[in-house]
Image (cartoon, grey):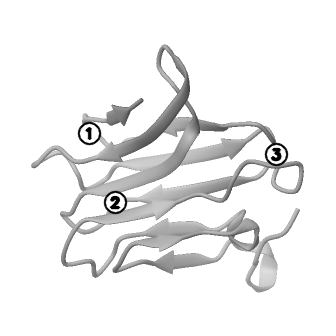
Amino acid sequence: MPGTFAPGGQREVVALTASTTLTDFDIGKIFTNRGASGAITITLPAPSAANRGGAIEVYVVADQTVLVLSTGNVILFNDAAGNSVAFSTAGQLIGGCFRMVSDGTSWFAQALQAGSNAVTTAT
């Protein structure tokens, strides 16, 4: 499984200030929106055998909307073919986290919050 790790086995943390498209080489990394001055969209790589079992985590640090996108490949509540998950509700952004896990066919979206962050989904 591809991934970038720092010495000592620690995971790489990357601050994103603009929208980006991730690749399989980003599997295992932690992303934040620290320093972002506006909403950002993080597009996941297509689920595949190469990233099966891999995870990407996205943390909201700046008070800006964060959307995680993988069109038709996100497993959501009551939806096996969702498009995206987001923290986009004003006042409920900071402290939100998505852990996205690939099974090679889909991305399983897990919301990990520091409080009562509202999760928005799109199908």
Q: Amino acid at mark 1?
A: Asn
Mark 3 or 2, nearer chain start: 3
Direction bottom: furthest residue? 7
Q: CA distance from mark 1 to mark 2?
A: 10 Å
Q: Which residue is mark 1?
A: 117
Q: Would residue 56 appear left or right of 77 to someone viewing this image?
A: right
Q: Which quadrant holds the N terminus? A: bottom right
Mark nearer the viewer, 3 or 2: 3
User: Callout 2: 10 Å neighbours few (<14), some, many (20+)?
Assistant: many
Q: CA distance from mark 1 to mark 3?
A: 26 Å
Q: Amino acid at mark 3?
A: Gly
Q: Position of residue 63 (x, y in %)?
A: 18, 63
Direction top: furthest residue? 78
The residue lying toward the viewer, choosing from 115 and 50, is: 50
Q: Which residue is mark 3?
A: 53
Q: Which residue is mark 2?
A: 60
Residue at (25, 56) in percent of width and height: 94
Q: Position of residue 30 (x, y in %)?
A: 57, 66
Q: Answer above or below: position of 89 versus 82.
A: below
In which quadrant of the rendered view does residue 81 lie?
top right
Does the residue at mark 1 contact the one at mark 3 (Cβ under 8 Å)?
A: no
Q: Secondary structure at mark 2?
A: loop
Disc marking residue 82: none
Q: Answer above or below: position of 78 versus 61.
A: above
Residue at (16, 43) in percent of width and height: 89
Q: Secondary structure at mark 1?
A: loop
Q: Position of residue 108 (x, y in %)?
A: 62, 35
Q: Position of residue 15 (x, y in %)?
A: 44, 79
Does the residue at mark 1 contact the one at mark 2 (Cβ under 8 Å)?
A: yes
Q: Amino acid at mark 2?
A: Val
